[in-house]
Amino acid sequence: MIHQDSYKQHISGQFNAELEAVKNHLLEMGGKVEQQIARAVESLLKRDSGEAMQVIAGDQEVNDMEVRIDEECSRILARRQPAASDLRLVIAIAKVTTDLERIGDEATKIARQAIKLSEEGKSPSSYVEARHIASHVASMLRKALDAFARLDVDMAVEVVVQDAEVDSEYGTALRSLVTFMMEDPRTISPVLNEMWALRSLERIGDHGSNIAEQVIYLVKGMDVRHIEPAQLQAQMKSSND
């Protein structure tokens, strides 16, 4: 006969294994999405339609990962009825999964703009803005996923603050691209394609920030989605004192 205490330990251990598994699946999805972004940006900068087509084809794998993780979360909620921090973890994973799927969608949009640029010709900007913002948002996503894996609130706050910087860079880039179009109307079509790609990169930054906010929610139990970065930093500092 199994002793009651050992039974509880077995169930708890099994539950922990399920939580760890779904968390690992989330980080695996994050790695795939990071790869999608890198390849999409590469296809844009090189106007490589072949690479772009592979990014578009790879989006289905991201979608499949989302469905699998959603199913795992639903099973855990139904069977385990988690409470407190365990419940926060499952909710955070479900929300981060949605953001990762949407980042995958944005990578696909960038790839589609790369195909158009391969047909219409290079943007006069030489993609300086796209290269810079792409590097910034890729770094944000990497930090957001690392913060989630390590439950690192300080790193998560850093990502949220960086999103405001990306927004500013995006505005500057748009003004620069408008100047190109005004100087030479023949550049309007490729420049517009680059603008749409930049818009997707800016959205990736937003989703990276969302992921970081879920880390803060997970660790601190605080919803910081509508708090200004400076206020967030002050709030985190006071909570750590």
Image: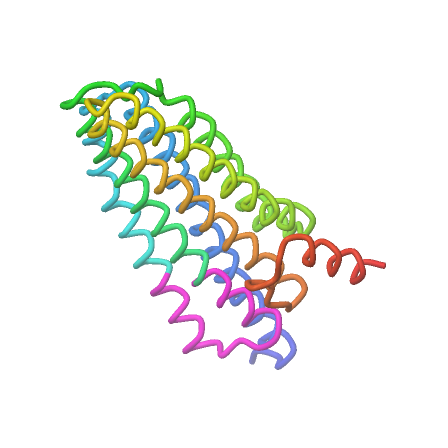
Report the residue at 41% width, 54% height from top: 99
Residue 160 image point, x, y percent: 58, 49
Q: Is residue 29 above or below residue 137?
A: below
Please tell me which residue lies in front, 222 or 123: 123
Q: Is residue 169 above or below residue 6?
A: above
Q: Quadrant of residue 186?
A: top left
Report the residue at 69% width, 48% height from top: 154
Please tell me which residue lies in front, 23 or 138: 138
Q: Which residue lies furthest to the right in this view?
A: 241
- Is 155 left or right of 191, judged from the image as shown? right
Dominant secondary-structure state across the stretch colored magenta: helix
Please tell me which residue lies in front, 231 or 3: 231
Q: Is residue 79 magenta?
A: yes
The image's colour scheme reads: rainbow
Q: In which quarter of the image is the C terminus?
A: bottom right
Q: How many marks?
A: 0
Q: In which quarter of the image is residue 96?
A: bottom left
Q: Is residue 89 magenta?
A: yes
Residue 78 image point, x, y percent: 41, 78
Q: Which residue lies furthest to the front in this view?
A: 183
Residue 125 image point, x, y percent: 35, 21
Q: What stretch is highlighted in magenta?
A: 70-94
Report the residue at 51% width, 33% height from top: 136
Q: In this view, does 116 lie above or below 95?
A: above
Q: Quadrant of the N terminus?
A: bottom right
- Is 74 left or right of 162, judged from the image as shown? left
Residue 38 image point, x, y percent: 38, 30
Report the residue at 78% width, 56% height from top: 237
Please tell me which residue lies in front, 59 or 80: 59
